[in-house]
Image: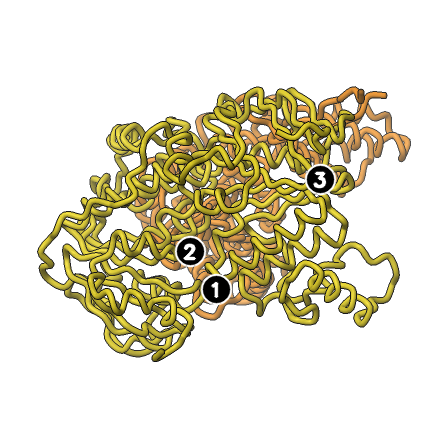
């Protein structure tokens, strides 16, 4: 009788680990196919429509790219904190604060030229998002609070603050009572690239992604981050200013999510309204884990999960599948890929008993 | 050798980790009623071989025979069921539980714990093997020696007949070691088989019936203990060269004070007062847990002093640690190589950069290539294996990791060295290298050597300090014969004889 045994891999898998990743994705698609079949939707057709909806046409790809932009930036920020093993769950709130900061500038200085106004909006978005990251970092280092709880709770505060502003002081008097600010002046809007629907935000993503990679790979601080992420005790032994690093990564993390909030408000919605909060900050956490905190992987994974969001909208229209299906599929992918991570380090062999 | 069927026979066992052949074709017999000592350099494959026997690792090839019949220890439970028990260097006990509860852990099948019966049973067992530990004591409050007794009791209670000890005396005081040996001799009388891994050659000679010498994954010599004429003879067989037992200690004129500790108090430290000069080695001895660790951690900036002052290289403690240069300063060689001195998940190169990074920066950039060249050179000079700067720290054996830490810390040209058990777990040849390095570094630096090995302290130090109960009881010159002879009494807290 063949028996199975778990054996630790001696060599690292390297690029071959992408097969495990693909197998995990396939498995999650299989599960979701079963779920579709259970409610009477033809599974193959459903998944096909999902893919076509996400990447099947120029419009679909553009829409996926647009949604990938905020997810990518939030995820980059989250990944920065995760590298230090600081669990920032607050990208959603930092994103909201970024949108608020950018809107504040856009509404306060509508007469400024674009070259001044846009950087001002970016700056304020980063400051606001960064502050939202700074508070839990300081609480953690000074009072020993748990950053997971604090960042999570601050998400609710941020969203309520956003609601308060758009229902109150910033409400557009001409909006017939809808909770939204006035549309931004043209100088406050990040334009689209040529005739495409994709905005210049994608260029911001490229630059910030490269900066992120350069920072963590080639700088002294990037090295200190990696060492502290591996062992806090060893970091203290080596005289690495750990508390300072915690504050630094949380501020960078918040600033990147804030930047995403700026792009979403300026380029996609052109104003501030409650519907700007669609959970990009939480998807970003999933993306960061799936991508193992590497910027290039984060880009690819952001696009995939953005595509999933777009594809599910299609599925909803064509086959009347509930929107919650998208969230379930996202969760399934995360679970299967994380479980698949086991096979990166171990393998199962069958042994014949003598 | 004895003619009876060995209780365990390892046949042609091979095991590789990646490209490193940890064990190759090892054949070894373990007999009932005999002590087998396994000796060899760090990374020779002793721990791997024993982990295979304990079912923790699976051999790539070869068979294990239990009383002649082949068995597969595919997990630790199977090995335990066959009577194999291992006393690890790092104890696996629940600190918050009592001795008896630890012994019975995972064994009681009922819902209720019967403390009375458990305590009686454990007390009975302890007495029959001459152990002193009380069954109702909480493990967290026990000394290392007592904790080890609990580990042994656990094995005896599940009727293990083959007991493996991985460097059991490394954490024990001399007295505790004697007690352990007495226990082992009793176990031998009861017909149990003992495997004993050790670097201390005197111990091996005192205790072993058979000796197997491992080198680079192979058994290079197997003999009865009676055939060994002296420790030097055993050492020669081990390393293939005569071991210098006396460390050469050229006189160095002590110069300026590099460390001044006055009326220091800290968590777990009552009182310490001393000066250390450049060119001088101050050996701190004492039974483990008498304040050496708090003293070292406070001096090295890991925990703040509560009272008193520390001046390092002329600067107040706080000021010194607020802006630390990377070279010509304080080098700390901690006892905890895995948890403190290195990042286990990072490569050798990254671990080299851990404390030397200050020397490889230009602006914000880290110059990894230059660091890589230096690290390559150090790996060669210190014979660190595997010789690959990209190897991860956890893949290295304890001895090789320590060499890596030493290479790194000496590269920083320190002016004050705090070395905590620097040769613990190293074989005699590697330890000798460390001693010579320290002696050489002494020309530029003051060295605070904290060690549990009295002969090491005596061989290296210019002055000796004895710690007892959180207090630095006394410091005196190594040449002060009268005081040196009183060290054991001081370690035991006896004021005047």
Q: Is residue B260 left or right of residue B227?
A: left
Residue A140's label in the rendered image is: 1
| Spatial separation of the CA atoms under disc 2 and disc 1 | 9 Å
Q: Colour of chain B?
A: yellow
Asked if disc 2 and disc 3 are in contact, CB closer than 8 Å, the reply is no
Q: Position of residue B31 (x, y in %)?
A: 67, 35
Q: Is residue A191 among what the camera can see?
A: no
Mark 2, other Cα within 10 Å: few <14 / some 14–19 / many ≥20: many
Say which of B80 and A117 sits in front: B80
Q: Chain of mark 1?
A: A
Q: Which mark is residue B293?
A: none
User: Mark 2 = which residue?
Assistant: A246
- Density class for disc 1 (Cα within 10 Å; few <14, some 14-19, many ≥20) is some
Q: Quadrant of the C terminus of chain A?
A: top right
Q: Give the answer, above or below, for where B408 lies relative to B488.
A: above
B307, B99: nearer the viewer = B99
Residue at the spot of label 3: B76
Numbered disc 2: what chain?
A
| A257 up-or-down from A35: above or below | below
Q: Residue at x 47, y 60 (%)?
A: B173
Q: Tell me: residue B380, above or below residue B474.
A: above
The x, y position of residue B314, in whole percent, is: 15, 65
Residue drawn at 82 percent across, 31 percent down: A319
Q: Are marks 1 and 3 on the same chain?
A: no
Q: Nearer the viewer, residue A285 or A236?
A: A236
Q: Secondary structure at mark 1?
A: helix
Badge 3 marks a residue whose secondary structure is helix
The residue lying toward the viewer, choosing from B65 and A176, is B65
Query: Is mark 2 in CB contact (under 8 Å) with mark 1?
Result: yes
* Tags 2 and 1 both on a single chain: yes
- Up/down of B449 relative to A292, above or below: below
């Amino acid at each position: 009788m063949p028996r199975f045994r778990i054996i630790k891999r001696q060599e690292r898998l390297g690029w071959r680990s992408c097969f495990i990743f693909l197998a995990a994705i396939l498995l999650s698609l299989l599960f979701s196919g079963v779920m579709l079949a259970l409610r009477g939707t033809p599974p193959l057709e459903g998944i096909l429509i999902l893919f076509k909806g996400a990447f099947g046409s120029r419009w679909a790809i553009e829409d996926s790219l647009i949604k990938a932009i905020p997810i990518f930036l939030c995820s980059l920020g989250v990944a920065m904190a995760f590298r230090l093993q600081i669990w920032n769950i607050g990208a959603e709130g930092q994103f909201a604060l970024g949108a608020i900061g950018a809107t504040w500038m856009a509404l306060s200085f509508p007469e400024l030229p674009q070259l001044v106004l846009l950087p001002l909006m970016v700056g304020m978005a980063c400051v606001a998002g960064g502050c939202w990251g700074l508070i839990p970092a300081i609480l953690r280092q000074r009072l020993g609070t748990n950053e997971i709880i604090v960042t999570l709770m601050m998400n609710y505060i941020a969203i309520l603050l956003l609601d308060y502003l758009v229902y109150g002081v910033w409400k557009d008097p001409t909006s017939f009572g809808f909770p939204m600010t006035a549309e931004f002046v043209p100088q406050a809007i990040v334009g689209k690239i040529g005739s495409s629907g994709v905005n210049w935000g994608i260029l911001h993503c490229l630059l910030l992604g490269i900066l992120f990679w350069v920072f963590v790979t080639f700088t002294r601080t990037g090295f200190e981050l990696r060492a502290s992420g591996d062992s806090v005790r060893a970091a203290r032994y080596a005289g690495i200013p750990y508390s300072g690093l915690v504050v630094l990564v949380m501020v960078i993390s918040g600033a990147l999510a804030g930047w995403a909030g700026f792009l979403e408000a300026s380029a996609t919605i052109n104003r501030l309204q409650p519907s700007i909060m669609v959970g990009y900050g939480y998807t970003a956490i999933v993306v960061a884990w799936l991508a193992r905190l590497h910027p290039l992987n984060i880009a690819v994974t952001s696009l995939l999960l953005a595509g999933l969001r777009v594809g599910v909208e299609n599925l909803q229209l064509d086959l009347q599948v509930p929107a919650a299906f998208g969230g379930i599929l996202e969760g399934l992918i995360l679970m299967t890929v994380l479980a698949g991570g086991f096979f990166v380090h171990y393998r199962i062999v069958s042994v014949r008993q003598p | 050798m004895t003619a009876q069927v060995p209780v365990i026979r390892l046949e042609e066992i091979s095991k590789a980790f990646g490209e490193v052949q940890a064990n190759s074709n090892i054949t070894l017999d373990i007999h009932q009623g005999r002590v087998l000592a396994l000796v060899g350099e760090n990374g020779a494959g002793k721990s791997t071989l024993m982990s295979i026997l304990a079912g923790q690792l699976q051999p790539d090839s070869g068979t294990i025979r239990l009383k002649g019949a082949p068995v597969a220890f595919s997990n630790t439970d199977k090995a335990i069921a066959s009577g194999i028990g291992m006393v690890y260097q790092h104890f696996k006990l629940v600190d918050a539980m009592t001795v008896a509860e630890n012994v019975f852990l995972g064994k009681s099948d009922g819902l209720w714990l019967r403390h009375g019966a458990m305590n009686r049973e454990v007390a009975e067992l302890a007495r029959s093997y001459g152990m002193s530990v009380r069954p109702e004591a909480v493990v967290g409050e026990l000394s290392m020696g007592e904790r080890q007794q609990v580990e042994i009791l656990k094995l005896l209670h599940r009727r293990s007949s083959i007991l493996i000890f991985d460097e059991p005396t490394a954490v024990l005081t001399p007295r505790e070691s004697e007690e352990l040996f007495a226990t082992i001799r009793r176990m031998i009388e009861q017909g149990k088989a003992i495997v004993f891994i050790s670097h201390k050659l005197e111990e091996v000679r005192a205790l072993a019936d058979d000796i197997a010498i491992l080198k680079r994954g192979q058994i290079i010599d197997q003999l009865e203990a009676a055939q060994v004429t002296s420790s030097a003879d055993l050492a020669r067989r081990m390393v293939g060269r005569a071991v210098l037992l006396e460390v050469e200690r050229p006189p160095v004129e002590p110069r300026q004070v590099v460390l001044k500790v006055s009326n220091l108090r800290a968590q777990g430290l009552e009182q310490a007062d001393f000066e250390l000069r450049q060119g001088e080695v101050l050996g701190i001895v004492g039974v483990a847990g008498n304040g050496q660790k708090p003293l070292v951690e406070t001096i090295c900036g890991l925990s703040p002093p509560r009272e008193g002052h520390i001046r390092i290289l002329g600067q107040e403690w706080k000021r010194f640690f607020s802006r630390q240069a990377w070279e010509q300063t304080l080098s700390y060689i901690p006892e905890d190589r895995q948890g403190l001195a290195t990042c286990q998940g990072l490569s050798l190169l990254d671990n080299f950069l851990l404390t030397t990074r200050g020397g490889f920066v230009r602006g914000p950039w880290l110059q990894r290539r230059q660091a890589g060249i230096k690290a390559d050179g150090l790996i060669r000079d210190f014979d660190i294996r595997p010789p690959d700067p990209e190897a991860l720290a956890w893949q290295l054996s304890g001895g090789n990791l320590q060499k890596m830490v030493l290479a790194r810390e000496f590269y920083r040209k320190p002016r004050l060295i705090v070395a905590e058990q620097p040769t613990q777990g190293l074989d005699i040849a590697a330890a000798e290298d460390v001693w010579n390095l320290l002696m050489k570094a002494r020309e530029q630096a003051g060295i605070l050597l904290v060690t549990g090995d009295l002969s090491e302290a005596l061989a290296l130090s210019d002055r000796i300090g004895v710690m007892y109960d959180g207090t630095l009881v006394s410091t005196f010159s190594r040449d002060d014969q009268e005081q040196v002879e009183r060290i054991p009494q001081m370690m035991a807290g006896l004021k005047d004889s």
